Amino acid sequence: ADFYDAFSQVVEQIKEIKDVLIEFKYKYKEFYEYEQKQEDILKDITKNDNFDEKLYLDTLLDLKTKASKLQVQKMKEIHKILDKKQKEKFADYIKEWEIE
């Protein structure tokens, strides 16, 4: 019974994590569309005769903040699903989960 219970737990965790990743696939899609628009703004600032340092910085910080918040939300959702031992292993792979 112990093996079956452990196996059932892992199967359920996989399903839950898959659901989280599917949910975030759509959130990332929205983010990437937003990112494209913001990158257009950055290009326009760069092409302009007068470089608007404040607008460039604000746009860049906004992008980085949104990307970071999205990553934190995803990590939090996955973290809730894992047990203590899994969380320790997961911590080693956090770098791979970052938005580039």
Image: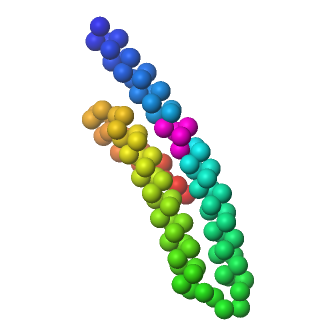
The count of marks equals 0
- Any part of residue 4 in sight: yes
Write the residue at 50% across / 61% down.
Answer: 66
For the N terminus, the quadrant is top left
Main SS of residues in magenta? helix
Most foreground residue, 1 or 95? 1
The way the protein has been coloured in the rendering is rainbow
Write the residue at 34% across / 34% down.
Answer: 82
Is 51 rendered above or below residue 42? below
Q: Give how far across and how far down residue 94 sits, in percent.
A: 41, 48
Q: Residue furthest bottom?
A: 50
Is 54 rendered above or below residue 99? below
Q: Give how far across and how far down residue 43 sits, in percent.
A: 69, 76
User: Is residue 22 inside the magenta stretch?
Assistant: yes
Is 12 rendered above or below residue 71? above
Using residue 31 as the reference point, say whether residue 1 is left or right of it.
Answer: left
Q: In the rendered image, which quarter is residue 8 located in?
A: top left
- Any part of residue 92 in sight: no
Most foreground residue, 93 or 11? 11
Write the residue at 51% across / 32% down.
Answer: 18
For the C terminus, the quadrant is bottom right
Write the residue at 28% across / 12% down.
Answer: 2
Is 96 rendered above or below residue 89? below
User: Is residue 27 inside the magenta stretch?
Assistant: no
Q: Residue furthest top?
A: 1
Using residue 55 as the reference point, say whether residue 20 is left or right of it.
Answer: left
Task: State which region is magenta.
Answer: 20-24
